[in-house]
């Protein structure tokens, strides 16, 4: 695809306004960073979008975050375009507990903000993935504060996840489910 023909170059998954912004920024020499975070399902839309982005030769950097299961479904040519691959293994329960200790101390919180069962439950729901663990913990803290709870319990963690009708990671709102970026 020729990079000088912006009008003919359409990117699947991106609505008109987002796409126009990307092309405008590139045309004036601004470098844009695109982050595709936590891709759990590699489908034709994802592959088409990545293909369009990679083939366009525009001034952007693309960060792609996938788990091992999704990684095997990416076409080889996409993987060959990667300049850098970083594998971050999931935390074990001990590392999750260390994270809680560090984060609570850093923020000046009390050691009993989370009980042991809630940390275990957050670790389970987050699949040991640091970003997910942090997100669940933050949501649970907010819910606990709203409810004026003494500490975050595993029951509260489950209630938070139920209220948001998701199991963390699998059903977080993502582009591609019911909320495609579409600004036509």
Image (spheres, grey):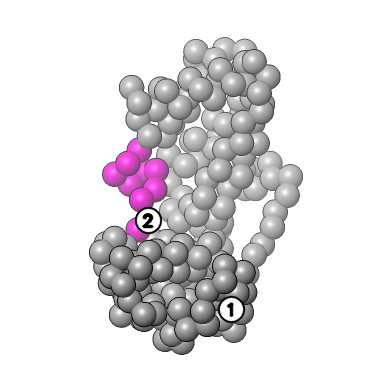
Residue under the image location 35 percent in, 30 percent down: 182
- Residue 176 part of the magenta segment: yes
In the foreground, 105 or 19: 105
x%, y% of residue 41?
43, 53
User: What residue did someone put label 2 on?
Assistant: 172
Residue at 45% of width from left, 69% of height from top? 137
- Check if residue 61 falls in the magenta segment: no
Task: Tell me the quarter of the image containing the C terminus.
Answer: top left
Q: Can residue 110 be seen from the camera position used here?
A: yes
Instruction: Residue 62: give x, y in percent of width and height.
Output: 62, 39
Along the viewing direction, whichever of 33 and 87 lies nearer the viewer: 33
* Above/below status of 68 relative to 27: below
Of mark 2 and mark 1, the one earlier in the sequence is 1
Q: Which residues are magenta?
A: 171-180
Nearer to us: label 2 or label 1: 1
State the image quarter where residue 157 is shown. bottom left
Q: Quadrant of residue 31?
A: top right
Mark 1: secondary structure: helix
Q: Nearer the viewer, residue 114 or 84?
A: 114
Q: Residue at x 49, y 35 (%)?
A: 49
Residue lying at 52% horizontally and 50% vertically, measured from the top left? 37
Q: Which mark is residue 101?
A: 1
Picture quarter with the N terminus: top right
Q: Main secondary structure of the magenta part?
A: loop
Q: Dot 2: few (<14), some (14–19), or many (≥20) neighbours within 10 Å?
A: few
Q: Position of residue 28 (x, y in %)?
A: 64, 15
State the image coordinates of residue 80 (x, y, percent, origin top left): 69, 45
Task: Give yes or no for contact between labels 2 and 1 (Cβ–Cβ under 8 Å).
Answer: no
Give the mark count: 2
């Amino acid at each position: 695809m020729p990079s000088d023909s912006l009008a003919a170059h359409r990117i699947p998954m991106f609505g008109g306004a987002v796409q126009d912004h990307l092309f405008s920024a590139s045309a004036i020499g601004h470098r844009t960073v695109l982050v595709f975070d936590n891709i759990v399902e590699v489908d034709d839309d994802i592959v088409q979008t990545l293909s369009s982005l990679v083939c366009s030769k525009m001034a952007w950097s693309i960060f792609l975050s996938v788990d091992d299961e999704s990684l095997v479904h990416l076409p080889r040519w996409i993987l060959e375009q990667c300049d850098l691959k970083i594998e971050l293994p999931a935390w074990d329960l001990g590392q999750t507990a260390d994270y809680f200790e560090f984060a609570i101390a850093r923020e000046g919180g009390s050691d009993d903000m989370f009980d042991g069962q809630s940390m275990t439950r957050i670790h389970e729901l987050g699949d040991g993935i640091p970003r997910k663990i942090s997100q669940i913990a933050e949501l649970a803290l907010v819910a606990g504060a709203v409810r004026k709870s003494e500490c975050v319990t595993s029951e509260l963690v489950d209630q938070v996840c139920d209220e948001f009708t998701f199991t963390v990671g699998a059903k977080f709102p993502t582009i591609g489910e019911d909320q495609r970026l579409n600004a036509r």
